[in-house]
Amino acid sequence: MPPRELPRLVEEALHDMAPYDARETLAAIVRERLPLLKKQARSRGDAVIHRAALVCAIAGDAVGAEALGAAYAKALHGYEITSGRDDSDGPVMNVVNWTYVIADDKGRPLEFGKALDRLYAAKSDAEGGILVIRDIYALPAQAGDEAAVDRAKNRAYQMLHDLLNDYAEKDFTPVIVLTGSVSGMEEYFKKNPAVAQYFTTPTVTAAAPPPPPPPAVDLQAPITVSKPLQLKKAGF
């Protein structure tokens, strides 16, 4: 039996991710895991795939990670797992830095409850698509007040927990994608098993963008002569 044809947006997503998907991990998730999750949900009669089953961690080059996040958003939309804000919308992706969630513009830990508000606002901007959180292991620039940092982090973690549990069966709840450095992500998951338990799918390795191709040589371009041509005498 010939392989089933993929939706157009999924094919586009696979093409988009190819230069950045160092180990082809995300391609495998898109080709194999997403159709399986959709089939399982359909067999159970579930209208929505649980968002915690769709989470993704992407570690490596920052530009490559963002490109992979956009491709993942397109693939989810192509499989009709996510729907956009209405039928005419394309795939939605909102990117937020973790330090923005837990600190003010001067790098000071946010007051009690403010971190929750910021993550909730980011979640609202990502409804119907994915929410990319960069560098979830990062601390505010002014992290001297450890108690304030912990309060801000705990409120944001509570919202993240809600997105992966209480809100995870709602159609417009965004899919959570974490990005960051390889070492930072590994250390974070070791120290935070409560979050790591959701990210059991292998971490995607993001490669740097490929170098631009060399400029094409115009064979029809005029030749400029900077000095008179010296012609050899016949016989020499």
Image: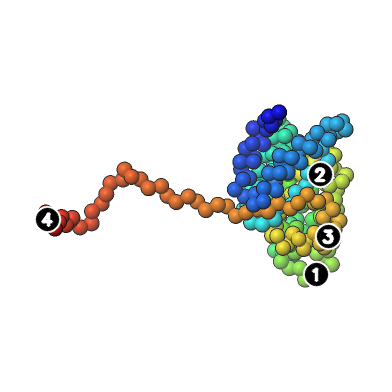
N-terminal of the two: label 1 or label 3? 1
N-terminal of the two: label 2 or label 1? 2
Could you say where residue 214 lies in the image, as x and y percent from the top left? 44, 51
Q: Image quarter for residue 71?
A: top right
Q: Pick whichever, 125 or 64, lies toward us.
A: 64
Question: Label 3 vs label 4: CA separation?
Answer: 85 Å
Question: Label 2 vs label 1: CA separation?
Answer: 36 Å
What is the residue that sits farthest to the top in this orientation?
1
Could you say where residue 207 lies in the image, as x and y percent from the top left? 62, 54
Residue named by callout 4: 235
Question: Label 4 vs label 1: CA separation?
Answer: 89 Å
N-terminal of the two: label 4 or label 1? 1
Q: Image quarter for residue 227?
A: bottom left
N-terminal of the two: label 2 or label 3? 2
Question: Label 1 vs label 3: CA separation?
Answer: 21 Å
Mark in front: 2 vs 1: 2
Q: Pick whichever, 99 or 180, lies toward us.
A: 180
Q: Amino acid at mark 1?
A: Asp
Q: Is residue 146 above or below residue 156?
A: below
N-terminal of the two: label 4 or label 2? 2
Mark 1 surroundings within 10 Å by alpha-carbon count, few (fewer than 14), some (14 through 19), many (20 or more) = few
Image disc number at residue 192:
3
Q: Which residue is located at x 79 percent, y 37 percent?
A: 36
Residue named by callout 1: 145
Image disc number at residue 53:
2
Could you say where residue 114 lies in the image, as x and y percent from the top left? 80, 55
Q: Amino acid at mark 2?
A: Ala
Q: Secondary structure at mark 1?
A: loop
Q: Secondary structure at mark 4?
A: loop
